[in-house]
Image: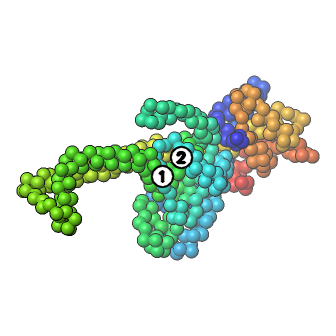
Amino acid sequence: MSNDRFIPFTKHDIVDLCAQELTEQDTESFKQFSHLLASLIHNQYHHQLESLKHNYAPFDPNRDTRLLGLISDEQKALHQAEFAKEFASILNAANYEKITSDDLQDALREESLFKVRLAVEFDDFAEVVFYRRGESQKTEQLRSWWGLKTHTLQFTNYERVAVFIRFKGADYFTAKNKKTLGYEPNSTIIKLFQNVPKADLEMLFPNSEVKMRPIDKVVIATSALIGGAIVLVTKLGASILLLIALLAFWGGWRNEEVHMSQQHFITFAIGMGVFASFIFKEWSKFKNRKIRFMKALTDNLYFKNLDNNAGVFHTLIDSAEEEDVKEALLAYTFLLKSPQGLTAQALDEKIEDWFKNSYQCELDFEITDALNKLTKMKLVTVIEQHYFSVELSQAKAQLDSHWDGLFNYS
């Protein structure tokens, strides 16, 4: 399993940890530098947030504002395409990894912790993209055979999962004579979840339906057959035999005449009523079991859901901003500690080893993004593939100068 790019510490914690690596006289200046750096990056992401809001507005299902004029299907498609591009960029900046189609199919085939079988109609979607962050291995004790047996299941867990889904147009649903429940044709939905087992990704699809597992069908069918047989034998046995004999006499297969009294018909009617009541009871058991499964699915999603639609990219913008600040601060700090300069690879390894040895944290540090950011801000210089940090006082002055041309870098 490859390490994540995500840095599992808050921005404020990283500032404190980096300050501890510097001399005491540099601590206050470094914290002022950190504040300036974070403020500039915040303004940069504010522009990206505004662009995301603008492109998402025409198809935002939770919009409470009006649109000026009608938007054609072609214009809406352009907005959707631009939004999808920006959304993927923000997810990458927030250090999310794309779940490939092969990974998704493997996940759907794995043994699920959630003991409900779900069916997903993939043909309803024009585009499906899943992203994840924070992959770890966990174990869970599962019970089977009505709680008499337990076994340990090891599974891959995703701390965060972002879902981007675009539905097909109205023509598709009309041609298939399908009803849409809770979503509109040609709409785009985005959702953010937490603590999702890899094998349970199918429960995140908006059109997933609860299906009875084979074991559940066997249990219900066995119960119905045994119970039905008992009802037939005890309540209708004699009446059925008499009715068969009567039909055989009428059909010429029996010579001995059969007489059915009014009491026989009453008994038969009562028996049929009991049998019909039993069938209804078993059918109700089936429906109630499915309702319980749907409630379990709803309860599970309730606690895993973090955000929906526009709220998702607000959350992701904040996360991407934090990751950028943390990466830039770490790279600058370790270059500041290395006056002789470091190559990108050496700096990358130095930071990763520091996390591993000092905080028992293994990660894949995003060195390229960090150095690109610092280089554009002129906080580092490059000489023969070696990177050198500028002094703290000069770095603070450089950041101050950026306020005049705040959005000249990306």
Q: Which residue is mark 1?
A: 118
In the depicted view, which residue is nearer to us: 209 or 262? 262
**CA neighbours of label 2 inside 10 A, class few (<14), some (14 to 19), many (20+):** many
User: For the residue labelled by badge 1, is the local secondary structure a helix, a strand or a loop?
Assistant: strand
Q: Which residue is mark 2?
A: 200
x and y percent of residue 152 in the render?
56, 33
| Position above or below: 309 against 158 | below
Q: Is residue 244 visible?
A: yes
Nearest to N terminus: mark 2 or mark 1: 1
Q: For the C terminus, give its image quadrant.
A: bottom right
In this rendering, position of residue 263 left or right of residue 369: left
Q: Is residue 38 visible?
A: no
The residue sitting at 30% across, 52% down in the picture is 283
Q: Residue furthest right?
A: 384
x and y percent of residue 284 in the render?
29, 50
Cα distance between the residues tagged 2 and 1: 9 Å
x and y percent of residue 343 in the render?
87, 41
Disc 2 marks which amino acid? Asp
User: For the residue labelled by badge 2, is the local secondary structure a helix, a strand or a loop?
Assistant: helix
The residue sitting at 7% across, 56% down in the picture is 261
**CA neighbours of label 1 inside 10 A, class few (<14), some (14 to 19), many (20+):** many
